[in-house]
Amino acid sequence: MVEYNEILNQTFRALADPTRRAMLEALRHGPKTIGALSEPLDITFAATSKHLGILEDADLIHREKRGRERICHLQPGHLQRARAWLEAHAAFWTSALDDLEAALKEEDESHG
Amino acid sequence: MVEYNEILNQTFRALADPTRRAMLEALRHGPKTIGALSEPLDITFAATSKHLGILEDADLIHREKRGRERICHLQPGHLQRARAWLEAHAAFWTSALDDLEAALKEEDESHG
DNA sequence: GTTATATTCATCCATATGGTTGAATATAAC
DNA sequence: GTTATATTCAACCATATGGATGAATATAAC
């Protein structure tokens, strides 16, 4: 079993690279072969393949073998985990800081 | 000006390390000194300081100098950027896959 | 002023990362 | 079967990363 923390590590790491984000964005317009993916990125097939390995480890895509080519598909899977983490923290964060601000203001008023 | 892509790089990179996520979680309970932060992490002050530098670069925290200590505070700033990116993609992603599924199902039914 | 405490800085180290290149593999086209 | 195409594999390289250690800095305590 891959633990939660490890999933977040892989997912955030996968998203931290602009080339990989570009790949995910390209895949929004539909599944693509490795060749089609690497073409606009100006890197070799091998480099593309490595990036896809990282995205696949993070469960953000999967590769389907079709003849001599591989078709890459988006896979929602762990993106939701990362999203949930961020969501929870962003929300708490903001509200905690709002509370702090409100508390400071109140304190200020009670002393004013 | 730090461009959008660079912000995402820094933010996701900052979040990709479990030690740094633990730090952010610790800071949810209120501001803390470097010492208080590093204590439960079992790493040196220097390592803690480096991690904080990365979190600060990503605009996720800021350090306030108070006497000989530094107080670390959460800072919502760029977390929202990362969140927005993930949010947009997760939403699109899921709905695109839902659409695909629906389309396949419909096609299936029209052929059945 | 001297000493203790909190933090950072400068090295240094092992490993990970993103990239390349050229060989290997698998399948399609002829 | 031979050749061409799509992709991966195996080195290899330069740089980044996460960590440690010991010296430096700044401030508090005495």
Image (spheres, coloured by chain):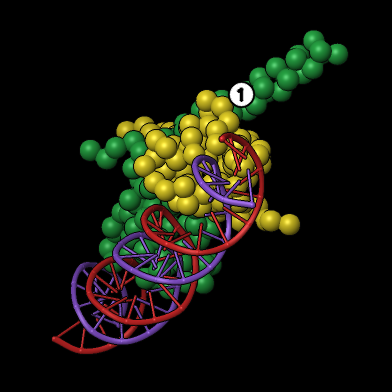
Chain colours: A yellow, B green, C red, D purple
The chain holding disc 1 is B
Residue A78 makes an appearance in the image: no
Residue drawn at x 58%, y 31% is A31
**Secondary element at image label 1:** helix
Write down the residue under mark 1: B96
**Residue A11: x percent and y percent?**
55, 47
Kindly identify the amino acid type of the residue bearing the numbered disc 1: Ala
Residue D20 appears left or right of B53: right
Residue drawn at x 81%, y 13% is B111
Place residue B93 in its image quadrant. top right
Viewer-side residue, D5 vs B70: D5
Question: Label 1 neighbourhood size at 10 Å, few (<14), some (14-19), many (20+)?
Answer: some
**Residue B15: x percent and y percent?**
48, 50
From what the image shows, is residue B89 above or below residue B33? above
**Residue D3: x percent and y percent?**
51, 46
From what the image shows, is residue B87 above or below residue D19? above
Residue drawn at x 76%, y 14% is B106
Residue drawn at x 42%, y 37% is A39
Place residue A98 in its image quadrant. top left
